[in-house]
Amino acid sequence: MNWPTTSMPPDAQPRAGPDVEAIAEQVFTALADPTRRAILATLAAQGPATATDLAGRLPVTRQAIAKHLALLAEAGLVRAEPGERRRVRYRLRSAPMQVAQQFLAALARDWDGPLDALKDHLDRTARKPATTPVHETRGHHG
């Protein structure tokens, strides 16, 4: 999916470094899955956790959790941190989510003008007095 850079806020315009469009696309792809959203919500509410910890808290196997965590890490939404006894803990990262939020904010701004114009038009139309169509007045003699 390609968003025109003109619809992006100035601070989200592509510049040297990671492609913001690619980051947003990875975030939206990651968020499309309800299990990944549940993993992110659990990490947000309860802090860093291992795949085993998450499997104990969610109705998903540890192997499935590990696959989802790998995709979330690839999207930059979680960071793997070495823990004690070679256990890897996963921590949320907010930067990719902020890029996605910038895209959503830009889309909302792009819609605000046309939607306001439509609302104004409908309000003006609703205030006009109703008229009876000519074909409904024929044949009626008082």
Image (cartoon, rainbow, N blue to C red):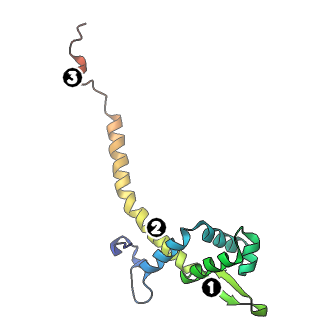
C-alpha distance separating marks 3 and 1: 70 Å
**Tag 2 residue:** 104
**Circle 1 SS class:** strand
Please, is residue 132 above or below residue 24 in the view?
A: above
The kind of residue tagged 1 is: Arg
Nearer the camera: disc 2 or disc 1: 1
Picture disc at residue 44 = none
Q: Residues within 10 Å of mark 3 (few under 14, many from 20)?
A: few
| Sequence order check, earlier mark of 2 and 1 | 1
**Mark 1 residue crowding within 10 angstroms, few (<14) / some (14–19) / many (20+):** some
Going 25% across and 20% down the picture, which residue do you hit? Answer: 136
Marks 2 and 3, how far apart in space?
A: 48 Å
**Residue 67 or residue 105, whichever sits in front:** 67
- Image disc number at residue 134: 3
Give left or right: position of 79 versus 133.
right
Q: Position of residue 125 (x, y in %)?
A: 32, 38
Please, what secondary structure does the residue beneath circle 2 have? Answer: helix
